[in-house]
Image: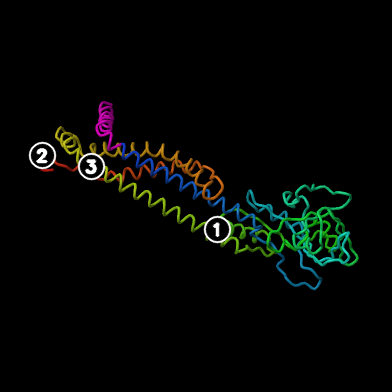
């Protein structure tokens, strides 16, 4: 107990003796912790942001019929397969079933019907923001349908107009809402209730494919594809590589850039702290010589310096990492337009890295432990 009290008393004296130089070291470690925490938080947040942004473009996994040719007509899947797909999916994933067919579409005020692609989908799964003020319940005893921008232009369609869909002798009616342009094939499609599409195609309880949207890294998505393939052997399960590969490349580049910047910040901080520690070491030669002359063991002297460096790293890390999380929020809002969400895991990692840099950078102080007391007192060291 007396040794422990003396140990911490000496540590306090070390901090009090050279406040100016130690304050410079503390500021360098705090700035390093702030930048490290900000960059690591942006790196962790980037994956979720990219995943969310790429999911806006649609599904990244397709479940389609394995046989592409059939003598009986359209190649479809049984609708019960959707439940099997959803049972295998992780949280935040979604699966939607579609039935595609080509029908003749005519509006109430159009002279000639127009051929268009119908995408049957459960009406409660249609994007409500795209439907604007429309409600998911039937209006005027008709169904609700979402018309793509190009299809609406061909039909010279006005919002709320009544559409008639015909396929052979089968006929369905719906009240239209015009979707915003997406720049893809959906601009030429008309999304209707899946039940109505099945009646038009005379394919009850059948779907053309299942579109699955799964968040995660490309590796996690490949694992989900493997799980779906094992559980649904009679279907062709494949990923949309243009989405998964692009997402992987972008995240790899962003992650690599942030990691390299973090490593550079830590390296520069280490050099700055090491330079300051060298000056501190030059001023402590006499103190170390006196400690060893009165019987201080080399490992105890070394422990003093390591404790001092660790405390500096801890103090700088605690304050700097907190400031870094706030900095990452501002950087995310300024650079990416969306404030980064603080990740609690980043805080202890940043503090630990700062302590590690402080200990490694205290190498000049560690060399003091090998100084001979006689050489110090003779002025030779």
Is there CB contact under 8 Å for labels 1 and 2?
no
Circle 2 Cα neighbour tier, 10 Å, few/some/many (<14 / 14–19 / ≥20): some
Q: Is residue 235 above or below residue 270?
A: below
Is 194 included in the stretch rendered in magenta? Answer: no
First reached walking from the N terminus: tag 1 or tag 3: 1
Label 2 – label 3 distance at C-alpha: 22 Å
Label 2 sits on residue? 374
The picture places residue 371, in percent across and down from the top left corner, at 16, 42
Give the residues in magenta: 1-22
Quarter holding the C terminus is top left
Residue, disc 3? 279
Q: Is residue 4 left or right of residue 125?
A: left
For the N terminus, the quadrant is top left
Residue 243's x, y, as percent?
60, 61
Nearest-to-viewer mark from 1 and 3: 3
In the displayed structure, does residue 142 sit left or right of residue 306?
right
Please name the colour scheme applied to the rendered image: rainbow
Q: Quadrant of residue 239?
A: bottom right
Q: Residue 225 in the image: state x and y as whole percent.
A: 62, 60
Residue located farthest toward the right when viewing the structure as drawn: 169
The span from disc 1 to disc 2 (Cα, nearest Å) is 63 Å
Say whether residue 351 is left or right of residue 215: left
Dominant SS type (magenta): helix
> Does 299 sit left or right of 352 as displayed?
left
Q: Residue at x 74, y 49 (%)?
A: 128
């Amino acid at each position: 107990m007396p040794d422990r009290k003396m140990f911490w008393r000496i540590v306090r004296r070390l901090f009090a003796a050279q406040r100016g130089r130690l304050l410079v070291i503390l500021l360098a470690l705090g700035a390093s912790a702030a930048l490290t925490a900000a960059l690591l938080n942006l790196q962790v947040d980037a994956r979720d942001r990219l995943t969310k942004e790429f999911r806006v473009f649609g599904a990244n996994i397709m479940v389609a019929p394995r046989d592409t040719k059939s003598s009986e007509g359209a190649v479809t899947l049984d609708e019960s397969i959707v439940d099997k797909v959803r049972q295998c999916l992780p949280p935040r994933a979604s699966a939607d079933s579609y039935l595609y067919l080509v029908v003749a579409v005519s509006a109430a005020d159009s002279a000639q019907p127009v051929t268009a692609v119908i995408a049957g989908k459960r009406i409660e799964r249609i994007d409500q923001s795209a439907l604007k003020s429309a409600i998911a319940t039937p209006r005027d005893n008709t169904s609700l349908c979402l018309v793509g921008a190009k299809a609406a232009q061909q039909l010279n369609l006005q919002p709320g107009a009544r559409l008639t869909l015909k396929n052979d002798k089968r006929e369905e009616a719906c009240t239209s809402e015009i979707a915003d342009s997406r720049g893809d094939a959906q601009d030429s499609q008309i999304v209707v209730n899946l039940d109505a599409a099945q009646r038009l195609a005379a394919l009850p309880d059948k779907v053309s494919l299942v579109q699955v949207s799964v968040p995660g890294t490309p590796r996690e998505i490949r694992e989900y594809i493997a799980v779906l393939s094992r559980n649904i052997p009679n279907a062709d399960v494949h990923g949309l590589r243009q989405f998964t590969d692009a997402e992987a490349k972008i995240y790899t580049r962003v992650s690599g850039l942030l990691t390299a910047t973090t490593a550079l910040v830590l390296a520069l901080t280490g050099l700055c702290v090491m330079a300051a520690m060298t000056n501190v070491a030059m001023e402590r030669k006499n103190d170390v010589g006196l400690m060893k002359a009165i019987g201080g063991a080399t490992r105890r002297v070394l422990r003093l310096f390591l404790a001092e460096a660790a405390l500096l790293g801890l103090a700088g890390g605690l304050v700097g990492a907190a400031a870094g999380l706030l900095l990452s929020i501002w950087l995310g809002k300024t650079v990416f337009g969306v404030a980064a969400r603080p990740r609690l895991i980043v805080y202890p990692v940043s503090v630990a890295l700062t302590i590690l840099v402080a200990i490694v950078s205290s190498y000049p102080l560690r060399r003091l432990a090998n100084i001979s007391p006689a050489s110090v007192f003779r002025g030779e060291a």
